[in-house]
Image (cartoon, rainbow, N blue to C red):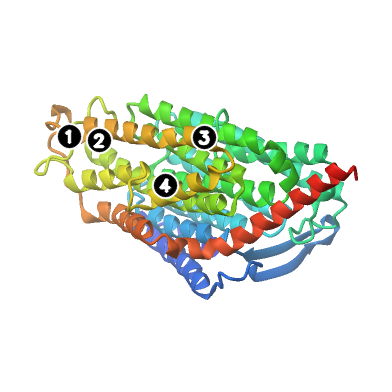
Amino acid sequence: MPLIGAALIGFSPSGINGKFARGVALVFASIAFLWTIILAIQFHPGEITQQFAESLTWIDVLGLNYNLGIDGLSLPLLVLNGLLTCIAIYSSDESLQRPKFYYSLILLLSAGVTGAFLAQDLLLFFLFYELELIPLYLLIAIWGGEKRGYAATKFLIYTAVSGILILASFLGMVWLSGSSSFALATLNPTTLPLATQLLLLGGILVGFGIKIPLVPFHTWLPDAHVEASTPISVLLAGVLLKLGTYGLLRFGMNLLPEAWAYVAPWLATWAVVSVLYGASCAIAQTDMKKMVAYSSIGHMGYVLLAAAASTPLSVLGAVMQMISHGLISAMLFLLVGVVYKKAGSRDLEILQGLLNPERGMPVIGSLIVVGAMASAGIPGMVGFISEFIVFRGSFPVFPVQTLLSMIGTGLTAVYFLILLNRAFFGRLSAQVTNLPRVYWSDRAPAAILAVLIVIFGIQPGWLARWTEPTITAMVNSQNVVVAVSLDKVGTGD
């Protein structure tokens, strides 16, 4: 559906205006989103195999087939992508330049992300993974800020290196294991020597670590966020970063469990570094958008910690953290975008008193307070329960790393309190007086996300029930493989 919408908008008459193009894009994005809701309703959580699977022969010589399917790991991310695509299109400016090209690229981006979450073939995943690269590059390079060229080129280079490493690891898995196809169902790289598995896993870790991003491969992210427009930042933080964490779980932890268990302590330490470094950098920022961007680096570190522990509870927490971060970060970027649009600045040295009920932005400020509380892990919101499950599942395996990562939660509260105290409390600064009126159309997308954040915080079972059976089966099978491998080592086989 997004591809059809992109084609219709892209090849439509040149005279159509931005409002019409946005309406058409929103219709097709909404259809795709509603389709994911229908799939979620028909999905059977108790079945751990791929559901709604379809397979078409494509290129026999390469062993490439068009294999798609959904399980409990991909379904929540699929729904999240559909929701945030609709919100990004709705939040786009009606008066932007070249609207046909813009909305076609957003729909093409959504199609690439959807295909990556559905792909049950390594090479097919890689094709979809690369498909989203060019649209996002163009969306930053054309409609970004003053330094958009630099930010877009930096993103392109980093992501290109990420793709090369991932493709090399995928090819190595298939060729070295003697598999005749790239299908996940038939691939068994656990028969390879441990040294070979570690080499392949290294490419996957660095490749997806760039996408997540993890320290020290993170430097492209703040630049991309600051220069990207608000709707593109919503998609980038809310969905596109999750391709990296999804890839680690699906292709790292799941396919190479022996090597994963071997490097798990190092991964947990890597997670701690990312959490504390991301939070420390966020504290030092004066640009609201850059502060939220650095917070993403820290919160994605929790996912790596949970994946390193590889317990059913921790990996469930990893998936819930991906969803909660997608909702919270998208909400915060939307609200920061409204502040920038109305006040003309994101600088904490300039903004002050925006919670003023008469001349400020009291509703926007109140929603940012909600988003900050959710990101800092206040109970009753989805950010708390996802982080709690991550820490509870990881502590028995990596107690020291878990305790150090928990410091990141306290630091999150610190930098968001700095943001709120400087920009929203106190007397309204003279530089931002006579603010334009904020309409409900500006507030509605963030309000919808705020409602979801509270609902899933109060009833996390509504989110966990789709994922828990798949995750439990995945982790248990991984533990069996690792145990068998250790037994072989112990007996000298």
**Disc 1 versus disc 4: nearer the observer:** 1
The answer to whether residue 148 shows anywhere in this view is no
**Disc 3 versus disc 2: nearer the observer:** 2
**Residue with the mark numbered 3:** 152
Element type at marker 2?
helix
Query: Identity of the amino acid at label 3?
Result: Ala
> Where's residue 327, x and y in %?
40, 51
The dot on residue 234 is 4
Element type at marker 3?
helix
Seen from the viewer's position, the closer of residues 441 and 202 is 202
**Residue with the mark numbered 2:** 420
Q: CA distance from mark 3 to mark 4?
A: 16 Å
Residue at the front extreme, as displayed: 491
Residue at point 38%, 55% (across, down): 87
Q: CA distance from mark 2 to mark 4?
A: 20 Å
Query: Identity of the amino acid at label 2?
Result: Leu
**Residue with the mark numbered 1:** 425
Query: Identity of the amino acid at label 1?
Result: Phe
